[in-house]
Image (tube, rainbow, N blue to C red):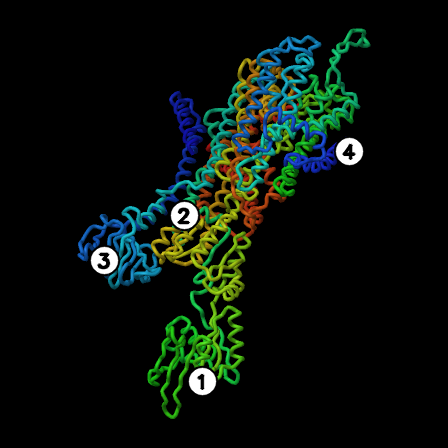
Amino acid sequence: MKPLEIAQVLALFVVVLTAAPLLGSYMARVYSGGRNFLSPVLGRVEHAIYRFGGVDPQIEMRWTTYAAALLAFNLVGLLLLWLLQLAQASLPLNPARLPNVGLWLAFNTAVSFVTNTNWQSYSGETTMSYLVQMAGLTIQNFVSAATGMAVAIALARGLARKSSSTIGNFWSDLVRGTLYILLPLSVILAFLLVSQGVVQTFSPPATALTLQGSPQVIPLGPAASQVAIKQLGSNGGGFFNANSAHPLENPTPFSNFLELVSILLIPAGLPFTYGSMVGSHRQGWAIFAAMATLFTVFLAGALASEFGMHPANLEGKEVRFGVANSVLWAVTTTAVSNGSVNSMHSSLSPLAGMLAMLNMQLGEVAFGGVGAGLYGMLMFVILTVFVAGLMVGRTPEYLGKKIEAFEIKMAVVAVLSPSAFILLFSPLAAVTKVGLASVLNPGPHGLSEILYAFSSAAANNGSAFAGLNANTDFYNILLGIAMLVGRYAVIVPALAIAGSMVVKQVTPPSSGTFPTDGLLFVALLVSVVVIIGALTFFPSLTLGPIVEHFLMRMGRTF
Amino acid sequence: MFVVLIGALLSTVTVGRALAASRVSGFDVQIVLWLWFTLLFANFAEAMAEGRGKAQADSLRKTRTTTLARRLRNDHEEQVSSGVLTPGDLVVCEAGDIIPSDGEVVDGVASVDESAITGESAPVIRESGGDRCAVTGGTRVLSDRIVVRITSEQGHTFLDRMIAMVEGARRQKTPNEIALTILLSALTIIFLLAVVSLKPVAAYSELASGQSGPSLVTVPALVALLVCLIPTTIGGLLSAIGISGMDRLVQRNVLAMSGRAVEAAGDVDVLLLDKTGTITFGNRMASAFVPAPQVAPDRLAQAAQLASLADETPEGRSIVILAKNRYNLRGRDISESQARFVPFTAQTRMSGVDFPSRDGHPPLVIRKGAADAIRQHVERLAGAFPPSVQEAVDAMGRQGSTPLVVAENGNVLGVVQLKDVVKGGIRERFAQLRVMGIRTVMVTGDNPLTAAAIAAEAGVDDFMSQANPEMKLRRIRQEQSEGHLVAMTGDGTNDAPALAQADVGVAMNTGTQAAREAGNMVDLDSNPTKLIEIVEIGKQLLMTRGALTTFSIANDVAKYFAILPAMFGTLYATAGQAGPLSALNVMGLHSPQSAILSAVIFNALIIVALVPLALRGVVYRPLGAGAILRRNLLVYGVGGLIAPFLGIKLIDVLLTLTRLV
């Protein structure tokens, strides 16, 4: 690595490490319902929304009500988005006169955006009208992110409150998260991006004459606003098909850096929010430390693998960004459940590609999606506490609350459901004709493409390995199901745990309780995450990227 | 284990069919054999643990034979079978009779041999009224006659419960066991998926590599991988760990009424300990002689000894012993001196001895008693109570001891200090408990001053003075409302509510029936200090489970490195070269067959190897949670990671040497 590249990586670490705790404590204040410095401006809007929706933000919900409100809200969003696509030809704001979207592609896309996955089986600029992009996708970019954050906050309340029964009000969490966190940050980021040259216009596509003299259509659109929230809300769905490798989405090294920071910002801030909500900043730091460790290890591994290739592996990468920034982005986007790409992951070295894949298969907890990373990690925390607690000879407890059969049941459902569906669907695709028809590359690389697609869907990441043509009914439906499972089979158990933990009594800590805010616990948590993920996926990875790696060293590529 | 059974059946069928077509390989047969061995070993562990309990239950059952009972009806005795007794019946038991069922003595006093239950051969006294009235069915009356009111229904007596408990018949899964089972089942399901998905993925890879059949993805091999991956080790040992925990309690003569209670014992963080019997020896003992001015210490000691020679109370005896030890004074035979002993009465609040005048000696009146009683006594004899003695008395009161003033005629000789003697080693025990995060609370009926002094000496964290059963109950409720788990011991009927309220209530076997019903454990030795051991056993039980789970899961890493390269070593191989995945064969195992077989054999043998650990429990040291976790992680986590690499390699070498594959 060149010194400049090292400096860029370090700069990212420093900026995130500085901004995350600040943002974290601000978010804690937002969700506590108190006033903050934006209240004078946005307070009226907030209350207008409550009045319009006919909700009383003061009414506290039990976990079942909370979950029902969340599911109902998401279901309505899904159906609306589906219908919007099926009818876009007859709706306004469609200057390119794009036809209606196919049934299952529309299903896949609706699920994808509602579940904060933003898997795109299509190419954005040539499929979706401006109306769908803005009123449908962009809105879901906001609310799906706010939904994920709400779940994390509700879970934090469940763990923090003592002998209570309610975990907050979903509507208020949704509105406050959108209004006070996502919206202001997006506005700032959008302006910064426009300053770097990201387009923001309602004009129809521009036509230019190339040097060869042939006409070239350059798709335009309101990109900056969508790019801002796609990064902040760990959505990742590009306005253009080339996503963040597209010069109109990510024009300069500075915009690249900005977007990286904004991908990490909220997920890295939430552990600190959590820390202040449970009344112990050390607990927040411990979770942040575990996430950061995983992230750093994966980044180091991927960089080592890429830079170990001679000559430098520039296939599929934007030369504007170079190897280091591409790998940094690849690791970040898969660690954070973002899914936007600035290079083609299919062309990463086998091991770097595997690490990106493994990142998602671990459930995306090394920062993870906004909210999703925190509640996903807390599921692992519960499993870790359980095993460690038994080893010190006590009924395991976390933050003074006992972990019992119900919590374990919910935590294993949350941790293992996405994995189960990856393991079910990938082989299915690998042996059926319809599945194999979409695969571009032969050999182990083809298997990696399939595995990556399902990992990405089940982890609600949304990035693609490229090479796989996923716009077939087979993949649209299976991936859609994987996304639904990956989202709601984690959210519902997480809320159930919040509901069961909130009623529990707190045992004051003693020297017989092992601390969950120390180095030992962080190390243990990291090992549990890695071991569970590795044990589950080692066989399939062996026949995909690992064998490809060894073959490449023997001089055979695919 | 169910999965192992299905897997073994499946591979047996496959191999059987191959056998029919005479295309069977010795390798497949060996795998199938070892799969059955795995199953056998897992059951063996459980059977062994249960076997111990069974033997104990059988010996208990012998005492439960139906006996004849002498039932009292309208003052008439009738002979009935013990099987027809119902609660409320009165039965008579005389020397030699076996007490037909559990009950309370309502009349009389008798010595009872309870060795059938406690194993303790010394007889115990059972009498009506008070805290020593409970008798247990199956025990034998050695002397005298008692009338017993039956309190238990047939089939629900203490003995019945005890048999059910040690046999494990009523053993239900404890909450932690349920949670662990859920985790293990979930892991099994995910490994099942991982292994099942391997078949189509392998098929794809074979197609992609343009090879046919290079990989070893046969049914026996896949089942072997699955059985190696799923947590068979902990799965096979789980119930053995639970049973052996109960068994360790029984070996210490403690009966737990439920497995839940044993587990709760590990969670306890507050111990309510009765001062008397647990922290101190039951009685006050003389610990010092403080003479009055111008009185020689040995004179005081001699007088005190004389006054106590006939005093059979423990306090009295301790004075005699102290005088003997300190001043080498031997209790003289005083019957010839025509001494007249004055016993303690509530009116005089003094005891002592009177010597008539003899051989020119004036008559001697020696008295010992509480300071104010002696003051009145000497003042009546026109003596004076020296101020320095009063100071000594006050000082002792402040230290929590009881002062006993000794007077000879009208002269005050000095004070004997009676002290509650704290048991040796108890202070260290409490310090250990504190490290483990357990708070000790001493409960005593003493006044606050005395209680504080003893509490300080014993090193308890807190104390309750002038405590009564209601206060105890209140204290338990308060601790519980703060989220603590409380354990206590008790024996009296008035302890029953507190015993029932406590998370772990250990009733003394000498206690009343009510106390024994209310507690969730009974200590047959009636040794209150044992509460501490019970807590340790509970912790050890949980630790063993956690350690073996960690070990079991950590083992999987090595098994992957053995089996996967074996299965796919030749995949994508080009002529004359080893396949790319043989690079994963880090252990350098001899052949694919030997690798898979070694992993399966290791997996089966490790269960057997760990049976002793499961039965004995992991080493328990009273340390803080962090230290324990670090240690167990190192031994069972890192150890579990490394051990199978060595073990599988070793088995592989042996297999190759013996040419089994």
Q: Image point 59% across, 15% down: which residue? A: A82
Q: Is mark 2 on a helix, strand or loop?
A: helix
Which mark, residue A69?
Answer: none
Residue that mark 4 sits on: A7
The lab-note entry on whether marks 3 and 4 share a chain reads no
Between marks 3 and 2, how big is the CA–CA gap?
35 Å
Q: Which of marks 4 and 1 is in front?
A: 1
Percent across and percent down for residue B403 are 48, 74
Chain letter for mark 3, please. Answer: B
Residue that mark 1 sits on: B410
Q: What element carries label 3?
A: strand
Percent across and percent down for residue B561 are 56, 32
Please indicate whether residue A40 sits to the left or right of residue A78 in the image.
right
How many marks do you count on the picture? 4
Residue that mark 3 sits on: B92
Q: Is mark 1 on a helix, strand or loop?
A: loop
Q: Do the residues labelled 2 and 1 touch (CB within 8 Å)?
A: no
The lab-note entry on whether marks 3 and 2 share a chain reads yes
Q: Quadrant of residue A522?
A: top right
Assign the N terminus of chain B to one quadrant of the image.
top left
The answer to which of marks 3 and 2 sits earlier in the sequence is 3
Is B521 placed above or below A407 here?
A: below
Between marks 3 and 4, how big is the CA–CA gap?
94 Å
Please say whether residue B70 is visible from this viewpoint: no
Q: Which of marks 1 and 3 is in front?
A: 1
Please indicate whether residue A318 sits to the left or right of residue A366 in the image.
right
Q: Nearer the viewer, residue A316 or A421?
A: A421
